[in-house]
Amino acid sequence: MKVLTKKLKILGETARFDVCGYTRSVDSAYHLNSFIYPAVGGKNKVYQLFKVLLSNFCKANCFYCINRKDRDCPRYRLEPAELAELFFSLWKKGYVDGLFLSSSIDKDANSTQEKMNRAVEILRRKYNYSGYVHLKVMPGVDEILVKKAIRLSSRISLNMEAPGTKFLKNISPDKDFSALLLKNLNRMCLLNREYPLPAGITSQLIVGAAGESDRDITSFVFHLYKKFNLKRVYYSGFEPIVKTPMEGLPPCAPLRELRLYQADILIRQYGFTPSEFVFDKKGNLILDKDPKLVWAENNPERFPVEVNTASIEELVRVPGIGLIGAKRILLRRKEKRITSPEELKGIRINISLSLKFLTFNGRYFKRESCLIPCDENNPVKEEYEPVYINQI
């Protein structure tokens, strides 16, 4: 039991680098057990995921990674049957709701994927578990193993790590961006059309380690969504790890990670293109304001918009108004013409932020004239709320 406890501690803690949401907001929400991870699904229901690596033995020597081959650290691995039995025991007791299984490349990619697939297969067939499973795909694995992973899982993912070949070489010189990553991702997406996954395919980028700019990242991510129809891309802010070649580099600023998640939402849900974002001289998003507000302030010819006649596409580009808020405005104006900000009371928008970009029946209201208090009784996180939670 002591050995298993040590395994779970190490393999659970190191699994946190495989992210599935805005990590800065949930680190404090981790349970005392490092392998139980709170994720949020439909209707903001919280699910507890058993999030663990099958092994932290690794043949790769990525410069930033806690599990790199040449790093001196405790090494453990779980056997497929051992992991399946452990997860099912926790699930049966109600401690966890689903499985997020990843791994370092132990020996080689194919044998590692085979063991990961086997663990899920035992769960599905021996224990008749039919719930949520997110399974990582190792770079460069054979197509037959990817196909099996898809058939066994609710969601699969492949870490792209960097937004292009030259950036990947700066952090993972042993990996071939085109042959191991892009080719594999394309294969996964083609197979997903044949065997659709309930929760789709996701990917992950390391931010702040390879010398990439936010312009590089958003352009690459736009390409991923357009070509591969990914469900989500996640951003893992670089953290310097002792006993790695990059231990002396500064960590990624939490605000940079947040701004990338906000830009990601604008691309996925609001129809923004990378060319519309405003970047600083280094090609990075402005840190002190969210990217939609920066865009609006730099496009004054687009505003104000009339709340009674604006299309949903125009409304969601107003700072402080998200998709839900825009849809509720459309419903409310069907009931009657909206003549003042007070008539938007109860709609989840940041009205104090939106005022200077709106007119009400042709009339412009100054912020100080707004009758709706911006406090805990009038939530203001509407448009970027998904950034602060993990969604399975």
Image (cartoon, grey):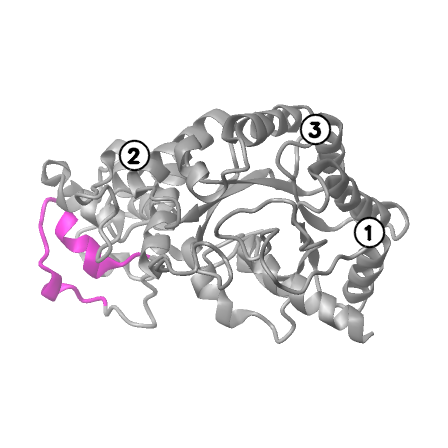
The x and y percentages for residue 90 are: 78, 66
- Please say whether residue 58 is one of the residues in the magenta stretch: no
Residue 255 picture quarter? bottom left
Q: Amino acid at mark 1?
A: Pro
Q: Amino acid at mark 2?
A: Pro
- Check contact, mark 3 vs mark 1: CB within 8 A: no
> Which residue is the site of mark 2?
274
The x and y percentages for residue 347 are: 34, 57
Query: Along the line of sight, which residue is nearer the eye, 8 or 192?
Result: 8
Range of magenta residues: 349-372
> Which residue is the site of mark 1?
80
Decide: few, some or many residues near mark 1? Use Cα within 10 Å; few <14, some 14-19, many ≥20. Answer: many
Marks 3 and 2, the one that precedes in the sequence = 3
Marks 3 and 1, the one that precedes in the sequence = 1
- Mark 3 vs mark 1, foreground winner is 1
Using the rendered image of the protein, determine whether residue 335 is visible from the camera's viewpoint.
yes
